[in-house]
Amino acid sequence: MINTVKRISIVIAVILALGGCGSLPEQLVSSNELVVTDYGQFVSSADDSDIRLGGVIDTVTNLVDRTRIEVVNLPIDSQGKPDIDREPDGRFIAYVDGFIDPITYQRGRLLSVVGKKQGREKAKIGEFEGEFPVINVYGQYLWRVEERLIINRSHGAFSSCWGYYCDDFYYGPTQGHIIKEVK
């Protein structure tokens, strides 16, 4: 009886843990199971291939009936999130039907898109002119970066709660670090 209760509680714990894992946002889901998510494969893939990429927005230009977004590619994970700890790897141009507000989709924001590859297009970055691959987007997701501050306070091996709210009244330098997460 006790073993059965333990097994059931372990199964429930595993289900809850897996349910808490992130998944691909609905906007980035493709009906095609074979979606290219690697920039190198994207560049060499055939037109009309399904593509899911992400990166940092460089420029947004609203045209008559669609919007042109230049994106600096960052590798994405299985949830479609751009990896801000990796170096950028190339650029691509994304065309989205309709109007995109350049204030919302401003330079430096993280964006992931899913769509069909549609050849290449000449573009200039400063004085440099190059050809960049194009995606006709049918789904996009704008990410936000959240920062958390972790403060490292070492009170020593023999310290207990001494000061007002256990802070030891220590006003000297404190070390910590900032953790950035894409959400």
Image: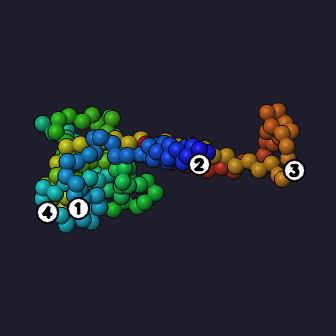
- 3D distance between C-alphas at marks 4 and 2: 55 Å
- Mark 3 and mark 1 in contact? Answer it, CB < 8 Å: no
Question: What kind of element bears circle 3?
Answer: loop
Mark sitting on residue 42:
1
Residue 84: x and y in percent read 43, 54
Q: CA distance from mark 1 to mark 2?
A: 51 Å
The amino acid type of the residue labelled 2 equals Asn
Q: Residues within 10 Å of mark 1 (few under 14, many from 20)?
A: many
Residue type, numbered disc 4: Ala
Of residues 110 and 63, the one nearer the viewer is: 110
User: Visible in this render: residue 12?
Assistant: yes
Seen at 38% across and 55% down, the residue is 77
From the viewer's side, name the closer residue of 92 and 11: 11
Query: Does the residue at mark 3 contact the one at mark 2 (Cβ under 8 Å)?
Result: no
Asked whether residue 134 is in view, the answer is no
Labels 3 and 2: the sequence-earlier one: 2
Q: Amino acid at mark 1?
A: Phe
| Mark 3 closeness class: few <14, some 14–19, many ≥20 residues within 10 Å | few
State the image coordinates of residue 138 (x, y, percent, origin top left): 19, 43
Q: Earlier in the sequence, mark 1 or mark 2?
A: 2
Q: Is residue 43 left or right of residue 143?
A: left
Q: Which residue is mark 4?
A: 46
Secondary structure state at the residue bearing disc 2: helix
Asked whether the beta carbons under mark 1 and mark 4 sit within 8 Å of each other, the answer is no
Residue placed under numbered mark 3 in the picture = 158
Q: Which residue is mark 2?
A: 3
